[in-house]
Image: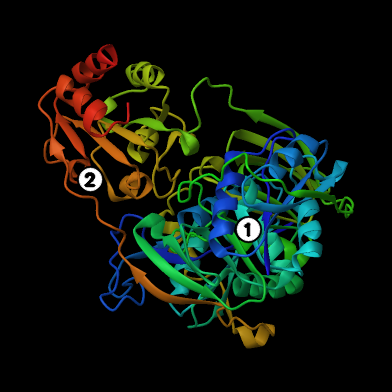
Amino acid sequence: MAVLVIAEHSGDALKPSTLVAVTAAAAIGGPVHVLVAGQGCAGAARAAATVAGVEKVLVADAAEYANGLAENLAPLVVGLAKGYGHVLAPATSFGKNVAPRVAALLDVAQVSDVTAVISPDTFERPIYAGNAIATVQSKDPVKVVTVRGTAFDKAAETGGSASVEAVAATGDAGLATFKGAELSKSERPELTSARVIVSGGRGMGSGENFAILESLADRMNAAVGASRAAVDAGFVPNDYQVGQTGKIVAPELYVAVGISGAIQHLAGMKDSKVIVAINKDEEAPIFQVADYGLVGDLFKIVPELTSKL
Amino acid sequence: MKVLVPVKRVIDYNVKIRVKADGTGVETTNVKMSMNPFDEIAVEEAVRLKEKGTASEVVAVSIGPAQAQETLRTALAMGADRAIHVQTDVETQPLGVAKALKALVDKEQPQLVVLGKQAIDDDANQTGQMLAALLGWAQGTFASKVEPGSGTVSVTREVDGGLETVELRLPAVVTTDLRLNEPRYASLPNIMKAKKKPIEAVSPADLGVDMTPRLTTLKVVEPARRKAGIKVGSVDELVDKLKNDARVI
């Protein structure tokens, strides 16, 4: 049975999350098909056709798919799903919104946020914010799976020569209307996709003091994050929060500044490849997970680090 | 309008969880349990809608073992008017929970269901979307702002690149993200008052719902431990390690 990947795209290009899902699809085995649904998405469809390992691209180009509304996308996917053993989506805000709606309409369970494919019906996934790893098996006829973006490599964008086939649109469900988006204009990368993250905790002392972290972040082309303690203290807005109740991140490099390392914070960042901790308290739990720890005054260390990079 | 708020009892977010030695799951015996933090935000939002006069009644629902009633008491102390407990000792999974909630929605006829975007135990992030699917309703997931209008609700959603706003036809399902509000602490008088508020008990069979788990957990293990790191003595040493050993800068 083939695997269907629901593509996340910007109309003219695929999002990296889609390439990750293609790799997971290839690990499951069987031909990989990619569904590109949107309005004016021919560019993304062409891009999907050249991705290594993709056999067929299905394109649903219609106004009702313009903004990725789950209410309109789910019936399209459900109509196609019967011919597939698996339906995969990236575990991004797009995929997390659509996939469970598809699964429920198919009356099947969903396996969320998988980090490894053990066999076509068995997957590993983190639970308790990554503090435990569960191996779960699905016996449902169609397995709906979302794929964690940090867990698989991206499929090569070239090398494939898939056929492209148009599929009929399913119409507007009339339930939801897209009103607009306010995408972050920050020059900095997003927390969940950044290669480097610089995070501050209660030790920053104030919101104004985050300026030194921002300088460091700019030097490293990093995103800026924070611990729950820093958010609760009002230093930075809630969307900076890395942790069990905030964003789960796994960058190449995570620099924790003035963060003691509460469990709830560690849960959100301990899968980072390299962790650096800067803290004046040498007993701080953050040092137990840090690859490189530097004990001292962050107000001296951070500017020095910025100047030496 | 009536608002239904499903809440889940989970291990408190401050507890360091322990994986059971036999690999069958996570130890929950003698562990502090609390309401799922995202569901607390959902209760808060519903209670605020009532305080503004938009909601007429807030009904909390929990699906789980007998102790789920404690979680419902918390919701009642925060301001929910009454509660429904769907009692089951079977492991709850999102599809089964969504089916039970659908049965309750059919009975209670709320205009809005508000629930957490995910529970911090299984991290599934499915129940709200599944419920919306089964009901054929619109879904506003990962909400950071909820503004009911006439026959519609405007929901600002936290998406990966920022925010987006959708207008949903009512009735609808909304799932809450962190920025939506800061949940209140229940005051002592309200905790006392909550003890007198009604909790109705039903079973999945009463609702005609099959909640048998679909996914089998084969094993649960601790994640690979990070190998112990080193302390560096200076910024220069740190930069050197990052450049030459870790090769991340």
Q: Residues within 10 Å of mark 1 (few under 14, many from 20)?
A: many
Q: Is residue A112 above or below residue A120?
A: above
Three-letter code, disc 2: Val
Task: Mark 1 vs mark 2: tell me if same chain.
Answer: yes
Residue beneath the point at 76% across and 70% down: A82
- SS assignment at label 2: loop
Residue beneath the point at 11% across and 36% down: A282
Q: Position of residue B239 (x, y in %)?
A: 22, 23
B43 with respect to B112 (left or right):
left
**Residue that carries the numbered disc 2 in the rendered image:** A289
Residue beneath the point at 25% across and 31% down: A258
Quarter occupied by the C terminus of chain A: top left
Residue beneath the point at 67% across and 51% down: A54
**Tag 1 subunit:** A
Which residue appears farthest toward the bottom when viewing the image? B205
**Residue that carries the numbered disc 1 in the rendered image:** A88
Quarter occupied by the N terminus of chain A: bottom right
A97 with respect to B137 (left or right):
left
- SS assignment at label 1: strand
Q: Is residue B137 above or below residue B97?
A: above
Distance from disc 1 to disc 2, alpha carbons, whole Å, reads 33 Å
